[in-house]
Amino acid sequence: MEYLSKERYDEILSELNNLIYVEYPKLKEDLSEARAQGDLSENAGYRAARRTQAKMISRINYLQNILNYARVIDPRNLPKDRVALLSKVGFTILNTGAQKTYTIVSPHEMNLQEGKISFKSPIGQALMGRKAGEIAEARTPSGILRLQIDSVTTVME
């Protein structure tokens, strides 16, 4: 089961609909045109269109699979005082003194440039279920990080 925010669910659904109803029909036309050009064994355009078709079908299947197992998170049902999915967490890395703020999300929503980390990441796992003021330890590839949780707020959509 995959937990997604409503925003991310809608983004995936939009991409899927675009692939199925816009991009795939265009690709079928390209395949028909390439097929009409004659000998398929020496038709590079046809082979390229077939490879594109295979990639597109794979992406469509992947997105459908995500949506089939997705559950949209209702932020109103999440704890307000503990780190959970869609929590915005401010913390200090005690090893370095660096202060960070991240939103905890599902792996399908992770985006470090937007300040979103997966709850399955080492830091995400260490923070989950904790309250402000607690210290957590994250086992990362670069070593153990001690994290002091400064604030926890729920992201409302």
Image (spheres, grey):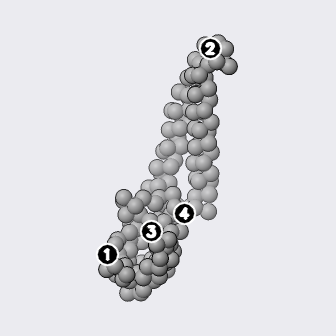
Report how far apart the C-alphas of labels 2 and 3 lie in the structure: 51 Å
Residue 145 in which image quadrant:
bottom left
Sequence-wise, which precedes: disc 4 or disc 1? 4
Is 7 above or below relative to 149?
A: above
Q: Which amino acid does label 3 sit on?
A: Ile
Q: Residue 12 at x, y = what percent?
A: 50, 49
The secondary structure type at the circle numbered 1 is strand
**Residue of label 4:** 3
Q: Which amino acid does label 2 sit on?
A: Ala
Residue 157, numbered circle: none
Say which of marks 2 and 3 sits in front.
Answer: 2
Residue 36, numbered circle: 2
Please name whichever residue, 108 or 145, is drawn nearer the observer in this view of the structure.
Answer: 145
Say which of marks 3 and 4 sits in front.
Answer: 3
Report how far apart the C-alphas of labels 1 and 2 lie in the structure: 61 Å
Sequence-wise, which precedes: disc 3 or disc 4? 4
**Residue of label 3:** 104
Q: Badge 2 local density, few (<14 within 10 Å), some, or many (20+)?
A: few
Say which of marks 4 and 2 sits in front.
Answer: 2
Please name whichever residue, 110 or 156, is drawn nearer the observer in this view of the structure.
Answer: 110
Q: Residue 114 at x, y = what percent?
A: 36, 59
